[in-house]
Amino acid sequence: MYRYILFDLDGTLLDTFVGVSRSVSYALEYFGKPVPRGKEMLRYLGPPLIESFQKLAGMSKNEAEAAVKKFRERYETAGVYEYGRFEDIKGVLSALREKGCTLAVATAKLEDIAKIMLEHAALTEEFAFIGGSARTEDRISKSQVIAYVLENLGNPDKEEVLMVGDRENDVLGAKENGIACCGLLCGYGSREELEKNGADHIVNFAADILQLI
């Protein structure tokens, strides 16, 4: 049924909570904003940061842009290497490729940073294409990133494409591009969030995706 599988990065391929949360805290503290604790910090993982700083920290667009630059100041030197691995994710990716699937990454994270992380995690070779957001405003939202990835995969039949992610922006971005989405409960979102936004499938772990193919 699905022959092209697009993966989110944060909370899907890698557990990036430590690096992202420390760098978000670094930016918020610099601008004198309250730093969320515990599960509240999870709200910053997934959606584009410029949106999160406005929505969650009450910043103006200009303030949010400055906060993103401050975030990157720390993340691109230290946070990028502060991640954990989800159990057997490499084995799952290899198994999907053995089944004849073409794999790609579609992340709201900056594309060059995503490539550095996946190379460091020894996952690069599993993907036909790694797509992320741009440093300019022409490709920021998850919908834009997914469209960009599909184009670079040769615009496959959308009925054969599955987006795999853990947050609402993954589900909504997939829907805006006319493709199905599988929500992962091992990431940073909740079942309620995924169901509310209309995920086509919801599974506990990445390995469960094998049953959909």
Image (tube, rainbow, N blue to C red):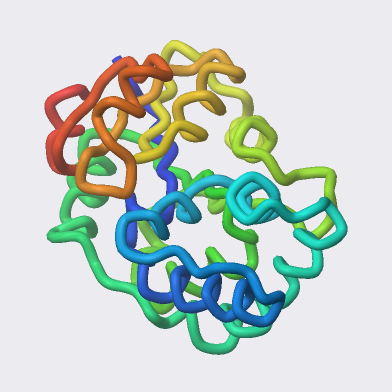
Who's the residue at 37% across and 66% down the image? 37
Residue under the point 33% across and 21% down: 2
Question: x and y percent of residue 11 in the render?
Answer: 34, 53
Location of residue 183 in the rendering, given as x and y in whole percent from the top left corner = 30, 31
- The correct choice, above or below, for 180 with respect to 24 in the image is above
User: From the viewer's perspective, is residue 172 above or below residue 50?
Assistant: above
Q: For this view, does 59 lie left or right of residue 13? A: right
- Which residue lies most toward the bottom here? 77
* Above or below: residue 143 compared with residue 106: above
Q: Position of residue 88 (x, y in %)?
A: 14, 59
Left or right: where 184 falls relative to 180: left
- The quadrant of the image that shows the C terminus is top left
| Displayed quadrant of residue 86 | bottom left
Q: Which residue occupies 44% across, 70% down?
A: 21
Q: 28 or 21: nearer the eye?
A: 28
Looking at the image, residue 91 sits to the left or right of residue 29; the answer is left
Quarter of the figure that contains the N terminus: top left
Residue at (63% x, 69% y) in the render: 33
How many numbered callouts? 0
Could you say which quadrant of the image residue 64 lies in?
bottom right
